[in-house]
Image (tube, helix red, strand yellow):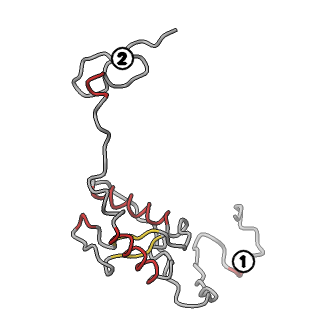
Amino acid sequence: MPRAPKICCEPKCPRICTPGQSRCALHKLKQPYKRTNPQRSSSTDHKARRARVLERDGYQCQIRYVGICTGTATHMDHIVPLSKGGADTDANSQSACAPCHKRKTSVEGNAAQGHRVRELPRAPAPLGPPSTPPAVPRRINMFRPDDDHQNQDPGWPIR
């Protein structure tokens, strides 16, 4: 059975589309969205800056979101976004792995649109060889029995 004709998806266009198409013949030729400045990331200057920044940071991610960071940097990120007045220089650039760069870009975009965003915690940058983690102080819970009463039946299940 053939598809039913539909109205063009462009706002305020009453024309009928051909079956299988979403736009009428007038709007079918409309250009898709393109980046405003595609030369920014493909220019020789940008490629050279990216190589310098990755080399300077030792190909290590500087953002380091806990849980998603791969550690190996393949992207260059602006510390202060260009849209907020940041400079397009080496001093305002940092190395980032793909997941951290994607998350940071998403957070910045959502914040620019006025959305409340929950920032992921960042891991501290490694200073040297790995060491043992510091001892965590014991928390006292006033609803659980003390150590003196461990062998007694508390009356509720202990998890």
Q: Position of residue 82 (x, y in %)?
A: 26, 67
Which quarter of the rendering shows the C terminus? bottom right
Q: Is residue 157 above or below residue 125?
A: above
Q: Is residue 55 above or below residue 117?
A: below
Point 31% across, 15% down: residue: 16
Which disc number belongs to residue 6? Answer: 2
Q: Please give left or right for residue 52 compared with residue 131 in the image.
A: left
The picture quadrant where one finds residue 94 is: bottom left
Q: How packed is label 2: few (under 14 Cα within 10 Å), some, or many (20 or more)? A: some
SS for callout 2? loop
- What is the three-letter code of the residue carrying label 1? His
Point 53% across, 85% down: residue: 126
Point 46% across, 81% down: residue: 55
Point 31% across, 43% down: residue: 33
The picture quadrant where one finds residue 133 is: bottom right
Q: Position of residue 52 (x, y in %)?
A: 41, 80
Q: Please give left or right for residue 105 compared with residue 132 in the image.
A: left
The residue most toward the right is 151
Q: Position of residue 110 (x, y in %)?
A: 33, 55
Q: How packed is label 1: few (under 14 Cα within 10 Å), some, or many (20 or more)? A: few
Which disc number belongs to residue 116? Answer: none
Which disc number belongs to residue 149? Answer: 1
